Amino acid sequence: DTALKGVAKLFERLERKHWAQGEDRGVLLTVEGTVLLQLNIIAKQKQTLAQTLVRALRESPSAPLKPFLFGMLLSLARVAKCEKHVFDYLQDAVLAHYSCKGPKLPCRSWGALQSAQEGLSFESLVDDMVSRSHEWDITIQGLVDFGKSLVRATGVGARDRVGLLVGGAAGEGNPLLMRIMLGVYILTRAFESHDAVRSDILKQCQQEILNDSDCSIYYIHLLARLCI
């Protein structure tokens, strides 16, 4: 809602002000982590909070997704009834972003989402989130779960999937596959940076590959990345 968007903008301004002056990032990141934890606690009591925020973001996008707002959404997604609303919004935003680089695809609130994500590098955003996640520890499991949700996304043809195993470009020109490969990137970065989520990611790889699921090829690709 408006209040949560205001909180996000406040911390975005504080980051620009304090970090431009060369002040210690750790202090502000710790404060932000405490705020994100409190928002998660509030969302458990008021489970329409995420739905209200997502509706507001869809109706009036004004800027690319920034780290604190992304962290806020991941924190809210830790509440089971909030997860779907948050991940649906983020998946649409990712698809809108990659479609700006290739053929346009139909998507809910399409024009607004494309406007909001113009010029955004989701890979850079993920890197930023991973670098903050030790202070924002409430977000790391949400980030991993979001990565899994991207890998589960559908709509990619067999030729593009097989291309991954023979060293083809990872989704170049195909927004749907690029969205899935962002999920692989998220899981790779999280695995490299956090001991706490490694067993979860490896278990997911094992489960999808042994079950020969539709997304097993992406987990094979993930394992290949982790072994390099």
Image: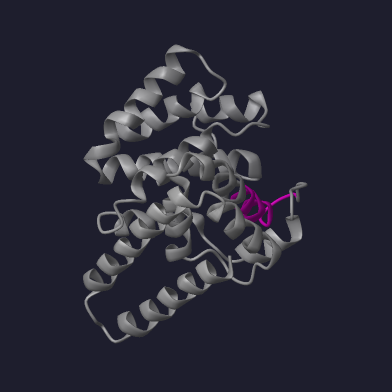
Judge whether 69 appears above or below 195 on screen: below
Judge whether 189 appears above or below 37 on screen: above
- Given residues 36 and 141, the one toward you in this image is 36
Q: Which residues fall within the magenta stretch?
A: 92-103
Dominant secondary-structure state across the stretch colored magenta? helix
Which residue is painted at 54% across and 53% down in the image? 50
Which residue is painted at 30% across and 39% down in the image? 191
Residue 222: image x %, image y %? 41, 32
Furthest-front residue in this view: 45
- Given residues 81 and 109, the one toward you in this image is 81
Which residue is painted at 62% across and 62% down in the image? 57
Residue 100: image x %, image y %? 68, 57
Taking 131 as reference, is 75 left or right? right
**Residue 28 placement: quadrant:** bottom left
Taking 170 as reference, is 136 left or right? left
Q: Can residue 71 be seen in this view?
A: yes
Q: Is residue 61 magenta?
A: no
